[in-house]
C-alpha cells in the first residue's frame, strides 16, 4: 500500500475554536505558589510572592488562548473576597481542599494570587479568562457579587471596591464555570445530578442579574466516572447550559497498579503504542458526551463541550516531577487532532496544569524549564488556522495494548493528519503525526484548491528518541526545528521522521 495524504482546501468542514489550546492553573501543590510565583522570602508562607518573569515570557510565546482558574477542586473551597485588597492584609489560610490529601498537595494559601492578579496575568498574556465559582461551600449571592467585582462599573458596590483596589475599568470576564466534579464523592459539595442541576440554575440566575452577557459552563462527566450524570443534569438545566465540561485523565491513577507506574516510567514499545494511541480513547469518550447532549437536547441545541481538564496521569509523583517525554508530546498533538475532528461541538480544552502539577512547564527555586509537552502548544497556537479543511490519510495501522484506563485499541493509523486554513484563505497548514517508534514514513502529498507559492515552511517537533525529555539547563532536547525548502522538495512526496510531528505551512 502506498502511503498518501490528500488535502482539499476548497472543502471547509468546521471552525476550530482557538480555546481548545487552553491552560489551567489551580492552587494545588506547587502550581501557583512555588511554580507560577516565586517566594521572595523562602520558608515564609506569606511571601512576598512574585511572578517568574522568564517563565511568564515562555508562556506568552506559546500564545495561550484561555486560562482557567481557580480550579478545579480547590475552587469549591475558595472565597474570592480573601484574595482582593492590599496583599499584606490578606489572610494566610490552610488550603481548604488540598491540605487534606497529604504532603504532596498540602499547601498553605496566602491569597497573594487573587482575582486582580489573575486578571492582570491573563491580560498581559493576551488570554481569555475562565473563572470557576465556588458552588461547593459558597452561595449564589457570593458568586453574583464576584461577577460584579469582575465586571461591574464603578457605580456598583463591588465595582467601586475593585476601583479602590486599583482597577477602574471592569475586567470583563465572560466565561464562568459553576462547580467542579460534583458527581464525585471526593468533591466539596458532592450532590446528585438533579440537585446539581437545580443549584446550577440558582447560581446562573443570580449571576445573570448582574451581567446578562455571560457564558456558563456546567459540570459534566465522563461516563466512566458517572454514567447517567450528563443526561440528568441536561434534563434539569439544559436550556441554560452553554458548555458542558468533561475531565479525562489517562491511563488514570485509579486503575494503575504500582508495577504499571514503573512500566510507564521506564517505557517500552507496548507502553509507547498505548500512550500515542490514547487520543482515540479521548475522542471516543468525547463522542459519548455529544451523544448525551443530542439525546436530551437534540442535535441543534448549540451546547458545546469544554474538555477543561485533561492530561496523562499515572503516578502521584507527577504532581511534583512530571518529566514528560517526546512520546507524551505526540500524545498532546493527538488530542489536538481529536479536538480538530470534533470542532463542531468541542469548544474549549484546558490541559492540567500550566506549571509543575503535571506541568507544561516546571519550576524550582530560581530555575524553570519548558517540558516536552510545551512545544505542541508553541507549534499549534502559532501555526494552526481557525478553519478546518478536508484531509484524508492512507497509511499502515497498528494495535495498542491495554494500559490502565486505556483499553486495547485496534487499527490505529501510523500517520494522523489535520489541515487548517487561515481566516483570509492565504495560509494552509498541514499537521502530520508519525506515531511509528522507529521508522520514517515516505508519503505522497496531494493538495487541491490551494495555489501554493515557491517555498514551504517546515516545522518539526522531535527529539533523539521517544524517551527524550527536557530538564533544567537542557530544555531543547525535545523541541521544534524549522526550515524552508522549495515546494518541489515537499510536493508531491515527503518523508515524515519517526516519532515526530511535522507542520507544513504553505502560503499563497
Image (spheres, rainbow, N blue to C red):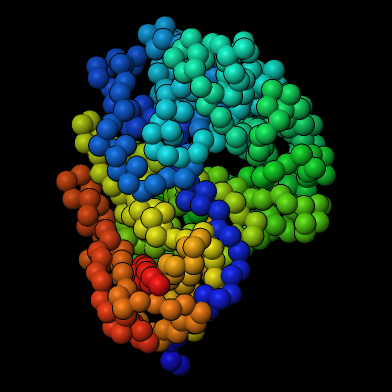
Question: Is residue 284 visible from the viewing direction of this image?
Answer: yes
Q: Position of residue 101 (x, y in %)?
A: 48, 29
Question: Residue 443's quadrant in the figure?
Answer: bottom left
Residue 252 lies left or right of residue 500; in this view the side is right
Q: Position of residue 318 (x, y in %)?
A: 38, 44
In the foreground, 88 or 122: 122
In the foreground, 16 or 452: 452
* Quarter of the picture holding the C terminus: bottom left
Image position of 311 with respect to 390: above or below: above
Q: How many marks?
A: 0
Extreme top residue here?
89
Question: Residue 39's quadrant in the figure?
Answer: top left
Question: Residue 153's quadrant in the figure?
Answer: top right
Extreme bottom residue here?
1
Q: Position of residue 375 (x, y in %)?
A: 33, 55
Question: Is residue 101 visible from the viewing direction of this image?
Answer: no
Q: Residue, x 69% and y 17% (percent of image)?
A: 141
Q: Position of residue 265 (x, y in %)?
A: 34, 55
Q: Residue, x 57% and y 65% (percent of image)?
A: 341
Image position of 132 with respect to 64: above or below: above
Q: Residue, x 59% and y 70% (percent of image)?
A: 12
In the foreground, 313 or 329: 329
Residue 449 lies left or right of residue 88; in this view the side is right
Residue 307 lies left or right of residue 4; in this view the side is right
* Quarter of the picture holding the N terminus: bottom left
Q: Residue, x 75% and y 54% (percent of image)?
A: 292
Amino acid at each position: 500500500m502506498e502511503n498518501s495524504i490528500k488535502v482539499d482546501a476548497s472543502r471547509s468542514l468546521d471552525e476550530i475554536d482557538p480555546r481548545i489550546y487552553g491552560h489551567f492553573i489551580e492552587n494545588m501543590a506547587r502550581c501557583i505558589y512555588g511554580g507560577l510565583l516565586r517566594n521572595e522570602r523562602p520558608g515564609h508562607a506569606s511571601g512576598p510572592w512574585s511572578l517568574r518573569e522568564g517563565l511568564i515570557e515562555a508562556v506568552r510565546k506559546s500564545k495561550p488562548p484561555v486560562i482557567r482558574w481557580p480550579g478545579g477542586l480547590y475552587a469549591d473551597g475558595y472565597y474570592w473576597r480573601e484574595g482582593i485588597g492590599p496583599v499584606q492584609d490578606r489572610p494566610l489560610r490552610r488550603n481548604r481542599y488540598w491540605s487534606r490529601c497529604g504532603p504532596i498537595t498540602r499547601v498553605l494559601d496566602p491569597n497573594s494570587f487573587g482575582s486582580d492578579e489573575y486578571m492582570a496575568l491573563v491580560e498581559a498574556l493576551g488570554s481569555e479568562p475562565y473563572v470557576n465559582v465556588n458552588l461547593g461551600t459558597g452561595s449564589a449571592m457570593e458568586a453574583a457579587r464576584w461577577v460584579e467585582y469582575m465586571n461591574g462599573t464603578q457605580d456598583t458596590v463591588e465595582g467601586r471596591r475593585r476601583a479602590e483596589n486599583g482597577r477602574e475599568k471592569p475586567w470583563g470576564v465572560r466565561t464562568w464555570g459553576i462547580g467542579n466534579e460534583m458527581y464525585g464523592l471526593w468533591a466539596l459539595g458532592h450532590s446528585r445530578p438533579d440537585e446539581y442541576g437545580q443549584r446550577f440554575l440558582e447560581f446562573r440566575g443570580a449571576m445573570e442579574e448582574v451581567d446578562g452577557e455571560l457564558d456558563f459552563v456546567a459540570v459534566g462527566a465522563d461516563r466512566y466516572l458517572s454514567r447517567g450524570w450528563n443526561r440528568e443534569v441536561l434534563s434539569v438545566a439544559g436550556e441554560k447550559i452553554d458548555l458542558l465540561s468533561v475531565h479525562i485523565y489517562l491511563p488514570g491513577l485509579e486503575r494503575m497498579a504500582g508495577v504499571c507506574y514503573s512500566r510507564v516510567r521506564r517505557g517500552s514499545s507496548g507502553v509507547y503504542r498505548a500512550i500515542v494511541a490514547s487520543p482515540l480513547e479521548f475522542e471516543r469518550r468525547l463522542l459519548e458526551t455529544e451523544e448525551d447532549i443530542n439525546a436530551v437536547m437534540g442535535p441543534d441545541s448549540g451546547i458545546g463541550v469544554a474538555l477543561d481538564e485533561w492530561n496523562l496521569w499515572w503516578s502521584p509523583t507527577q504532581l511534583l516531577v512530571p518529566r514528560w517525554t517526546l512520546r507524551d508530546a505526540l500524545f498532546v498533538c493527538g488530542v489536538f487532532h481529536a479536538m480538530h475532528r470534533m470542532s463542531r461541538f468541542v469548544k474549549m480544552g484546558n490541559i492540567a496544569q500550566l506549571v509543575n502539577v503535571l506541568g507544561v512547564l516546571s519550576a524550582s527555586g530560581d530555575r524553570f524549564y519548558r517540558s516536552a509537552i510545551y512545544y505542541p502548544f508553541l507549534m499549534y497556537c502559532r501555526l494552526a488556522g481557525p478553519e478546518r479543511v478536508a484531509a484524508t490519510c492512507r497509511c499502515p495501522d497498528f494495535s495498542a495494548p491495554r494500559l490502565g484506563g486505556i483499553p486495547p485499541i485496534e487499527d490505529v493509523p501510523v500517520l494522523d493528519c489535520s489541515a487548517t486554513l487561515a481566516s483570509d484563505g492565504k495560509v494552509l497548514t498541514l499537521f502530520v503525526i508519525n506515531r511509528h517508534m522507529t521508522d520514517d514514513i515516505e508519503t505522497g502529498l496531494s493538495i487541491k484548491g490551494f495555489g501554493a507559492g515557491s517555498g514551504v515552511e517546515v516545522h518539526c517537533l522531535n527529539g533523539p528518541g521517544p524517551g527524550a525529555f527536557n530538564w533544567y539547563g537542557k530544555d531543547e532536547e525535545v523541541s521544534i526545528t524549522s526550515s524552508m525548502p522549495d515546494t518541489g522538495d515537499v510536493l508531491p512526496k515527503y518523508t515524515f521522521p519517526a516519532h515526530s510531528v511535522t507542520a507544513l505551512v504553505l502560503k499563497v
